[in-house]
Image (tube, grey):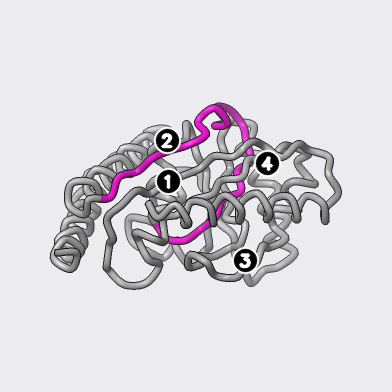
Amino acid sequence: MILVRSLTFALAFYLYSLIYGLLMLPLLLGPRSWVTRALSWYGKGTTLLLRVICGIRVEVRGRENLPKGAALIAAKHQCMFDIFGSFAFLPDSCFVTKKELMWIPFLGWYVRKGGMIVVDRDAHASALRKLLADARDRFRHARQVVIFAEGTRKAPGAEPDYKPGIAALYRDLEMPVTPMALNTGVHWPKHGFMRYPGMIVFDILPPIPAGLKRGEFMRELESRIETATNALIAEGL
């Protein structure tokens, strides 16, 4: 049954994405807000497909910690639904994403029009300078900048590997950081098409205040995200 549901979801999801991507094309001629609003509805549609076809529900915990204006969010990353799902509940999210995605038809166009922060990971110092400059610009528009603290997807239970980009943003922008834990990889593995029923949870944690030293901040961020993520996985949702 899970295999049949997973295959059905894969077909429905890619068909939905293709049709939705085509319908969004006229929005490229309008303001940025049109695209980001459409991406929010795309995330809600994907969430609905998961529930109806796969028996996967989505819950957002810690909404009282959800930033409504300019904010810096450091999230765990286990699968691509981390992005789609977050679009559905963040007010005006802006993801830090890799340059390679820009070559994908439709997706790359909407990433650019939506004002996401695109980073060339091979550019090192210049990439970091661009990241900081772009983040300052997005904050002027009261957006929530979301960065995956490990830089790439990690399977549930994998050894954490937090990257320096979030520390640079924290230091340079002098802003609190809101950590976000999740268990998406339990139900939507980073490889393959199998989708396992249960409850996906996005857990928005209390913000880490500005002003900590780099080492202290990184230890606190990793501890909070990993502890909350492991707790979600242990719940067996």
Q: Mark 4 highlights which residue?
A: 177
Q: How packed is label 4: few (under 14 Cα within 10 Å), some, or many (20 or more)?
A: many
Percent coordinates x, y for residue 11 in the rendering = 16, 62
Counting residues from the start of the chain, the first of labels 1 and 3 encountered is: 3
Under mark 3, the amino acid is: Pro
At x 37%, y 34%, the residue is: 37
Q: Which residues are magenta?
A: 56-80
How much space separates mark 3 and mark 2, taking CA atoms? 26 Å
Residue 6 sits above or below residue 217 on the image = below
Disc 1 and disc 3 in contact, CB within 8 angstroms: no
Percent coordinates x, y for residue 176 in the rendering = 71, 37
Under mark 1, the amino acid is: Val
Q: Mark 3 highlights which residue?
A: 160
Q: How packed is label 1: few (under 14 Cα within 10 Å), some, or many (20 or more)?
A: many
Q: Element type at marker 1?
A: strand
- Which disc number belongs to residue 201? 1
